[in-house]
Amino acid sequence: MKKIFSTIPVIGYSLLVIGLASCQDMFEPADENTRQEDAMYEESEYAHGLLIYGYDRLPYITTTQTDVATDDAVTNQTNSAYLNMATGTWASDNNPMSQWDNCKDGIQYVNKFLTIVEKTKWAPSAASKQAMFVDRLKGEAFGLRALLYYYLLQAHGGYADDGQLLGVPMLTTPEDGSSDFNLARTSFADCVRQCFADCDSAMALLPFDYGDIGNDNDIPEKYRALGANYSNYNLVFGTKATNLMSGKIAEAIKAQIALLAASPAFREKSGVTSAEAATLCANVLNRIGGMEGFDPTGHIWYKNKTKLEPSASEMPEMLWREDRHKNADQEKENFPPSLYGNGRVNPSQNLVDAFPMRSGLPITDPNSGYDPKNPYVNRDPRLTDDILYNGTVLRRSQIITGTYANDNDETYDNLNNNASSTRTGYYLMKLLRDDVSPQSSSLIEQYHIYPRIRYTEIYLAYAEAANDAWGPKADPTGVGFTAYDVIKAIRTRAGLATNEIGMALPEGDVYLEECANDQAKMTGLIRNERRIELCFENKRFWDLRRWLMPLDESVKGMKIDRDSLGVLSYTIFEVEERNYDNTYQMYGPIPKSEILKWSNLMQNKGWQ
């Protein structure tokens, strides 16, 4: 859909008052009316609405959704678009993964904003404030545009029939009634270069992070020369702007774009190497001291209840986060039915098997000690953190996912017992709070945070790119850490290579050391660690495609029976086949409606 600006939307709420409202918790929808475009120059709230609309179009998801279209999970929601997609309905005119309309709308708003930002009176009484507002707002706009294009490239970039690696039509000016809408797709490499340029522009204009200063000496010289004082500086760049696009966020977005471009699906013609991607990731991490900035509890941020409260300081794991929400929505969707949930996201046996033993050895290793008759003993502690399996206690209730009743003769949570039951033998634990009650008659809501960019994601991105470029233990650029160092820190944080009381095993992390001597094995380990660390954060679908790994692995579950003597037996079974075509569906389609409208718009190979 094309948005033409003959009139401009107005968002009439207090968040638009520049510098006066905290952006700590983002934007709520509001009423619209229309105004003529030239009114923007005198009314800054009106102009700012364009930028707010750019933020509003960011495609971040605050619940676990896309994982159920992968080998990590299924859903019991029979009308789920992602379930239907994974089982054979994915098409260019039926694409729940599409970012086309949403991101292109956001880019149109941002491009329009960039044409008026310097003409608008943000602070007519003070040249220094006007200059600071223009810089911040332009920087935000450039960063947003890069991010919106990143999501378009991830969802729609791919190879056309003629062998070209294409991105999307690249627009840096707003479209209007006189525009030529019949545009060809820009090459993927040129799209990446424009995104990099936008990130660089954002970093040049924005502070690395927002925060109040205490005296005029801390003001950047270019603003001090215009007469700025620290009070006005804080109004523009202080803590009130927290959670807006910043220099560190733009830098992280550039690193994410580079990792995508250097991945197997795109690297041949993207113009970006793994070495470049690793360097860009290292730039982000060096801002927090490299490995010194690694958060020792970052993998369980969702359990840190004190830090989830609005009065808490920022979590060191969060590079950028969604707003805080006080609700019981995730728990209502994903708690087992005995706790008044709908049990929507059901983790797969495939994912459970990806968690190693506590020793760090994969369960497939003959020396791992894995017992298929007691499969959850001595496993990676992250398994218990993230996945509810048979016998887990949640809110003082033992959850039985097997085929037998619990001690109270109840079968609410049993495998395939009812429409809200698990289809795999597992329920979701990650992201949920055990102090929430979704029961309508005794509702207890709590605050939740959903990350937009976690530092762990950037550490893993560095490890992936650095290992691909130089191997597990090489550090040719001298950043002070290697792919091996990152994976060792992640596995140590998780509690691997320790015994049941947390003491380090004398032999150490044997499997990590084995992988450290084999680049290909390290690649597999890094991908597995990313799968575990970022599970249920809507990353898996995109990772499989950029790695060119099969999408069609069928999803398995665990059936647990109990005999008359109380002995449990475990049987792995097929839950859901995945109907993807690996020959072309590694690259998402251009919407069919757009292909039919515009003759110059080429479809990705294989899509109709």
Image (cartoon, helix red, strand yellow):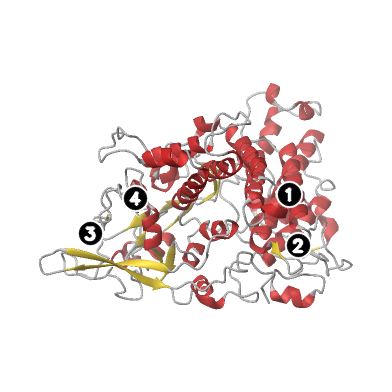
How many angstroms separate mark 2 from mark 1 (CA)?
A: 13 Å
Residue 210 visible: no
| Labelled disc at residue 164 | 2
Residue at x-position 80% and y-position 67%: 4
Q: Earlier in the sequence, mark 2 or mark 3?
A: 2
Q: Which residue is mark 4?
A: 365
Disc 2 secondary structure class: loop
Q: Relative to the observer, which residue lies in front, 15 or 416? A: 416
Rendered view: 528 above or below 283: below
Q: Which one is in front in this view, the residue at disc 4 or the one at disc 1?
A: 4
Q: Which residue is mark 3?
A: 373
Residue 9 horizontal/vertical position (percent): 74, 62
Q: Earlier in the sequence, mark 3 or mark 1?
A: 1
Query: What amino acid is found at the position of numbered circle 1 in the picture?
Result: Gly
Q: Earlier in the sequence, mark 4 or mark 2?
A: 2
Give left or right: position of 186 versus 605. right
Q: Are marks 4 and 3 in contact (CB under 8 Å)?
A: no
Residue 268 horizontal/vertical position (percent): 69, 53
Q: Earlier in the sequence, mark 4 or mark 3?
A: 4
Residue at x-position 69% and y-position 28%: 230
Residue 600 horizontal/vertical position (percent): 82, 70
Rendered view: 267 above or below 550: above
Disc 3 secondary structure class: loop
Query: What amino acid is found at the position of numbered circle 4 in the picture?
Result: Asp
Disc 4 secondary structure class: loop
Question: Neighbour class for label 3 at 10 Å: few (<14), some, many (≥20)?
Answer: few
Residue at x-position 81% and y-position 41%: 124
| Labelled disc at residue 271 | 1
How many angstroms separate mark 4 from mark 2 (CA)?
A: 42 Å
